[in-house]
Amino acid sequence: MQLVITLLLCILAYQSVYTMKRVVETTSRQFRAHQKDFFDLADKGQHIVIKRGSKQAYVLTPVSADDLYFTPKMVDRIKESQQEIKDGKGIVLRTQEELNTFFDTL
């Protein structure tokens, strides 16, 4: 029993140390001086935090084509939705109860 517990603790320690990604913190000045290096790290999945002063911090995250930003495809989806509303295919929900009922039907 003690051997099993020891083995489980070793596995947990291994997972904690070797599979968790380390967060790299840098200053905005260092980031500007070494942008390529930080972009390369972010592309490899590394978590990058850029600190600006003592109160502000930003995360450097790669954007993939699947992210829902205003890509041409997203703009087309918005235009289609606007046309559906103009065509009377929209749903008007005026109360919280109507909203709850609508979500229950999904």
Image: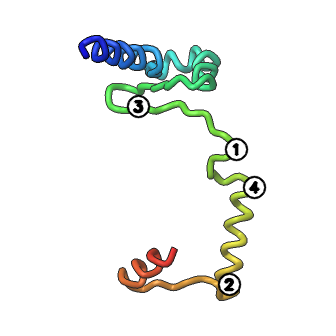
- Nearest the viewer among 39 and 3 is 3
Q: Residue at x 46, y 84 (%)?
A: 93
Amino acid identity at mark 1: Ala
Q: Position of residue 64 (x, y in %)?
A: 66, 40
Say which residue label 4 marks: 72
Q: Dot 3 lies on which element?
A: strand
Q: Position of residue 87 (x, y in %)?
A: 70, 86
Q: Amino acid at mark 2?
A: Lys
Residue type beneath disc 3: Ala
Q: Secondary structure at mark 2?
A: helix
Circle nearer the N terminus (4, 1):
1
Residue type pointed to by label 4: Pro
Q: Which residue is mark 1?
A: 65
Of labels 3 and 1, the one closer to you = 1
Q: Work out how far the residue at label 2 is from the one at label 4, CA to CA, in angstroms.
A: 21 Å
Q: Secondary structure at mark 4?
A: helix
Report the mark closest to the observer, 4 or 3: 4
Q: Is residue 95 visible?
A: yes
Rounded to the nearest angstrom, the CA distance separating label 4 from label 1 is: 11 Å
First along the sequence among labels 3 and 2: 3
The reply to whether discs 3 and 2 touch (Cβ–Cβ < 8 Å) is: no
The residue positioned 39% from the left and 16% from the top of the image is: 11
Q: Residues within 10 Å of mark 2 (few under 14, many from 20)?
A: few
Earlier-in-chain disc, 4 versus 3: 3
| Residue position marked by numbered label 2 in the rendering | 86
Return the x and y of residue 28 as percentages of the image width and height: 48, 22
On screen, residue 3 versus residue 72, left or right, reads left
Whether pointer 4 and pointer 1 mark residues with C-beta atoms closer than 8 Å, the reply is no
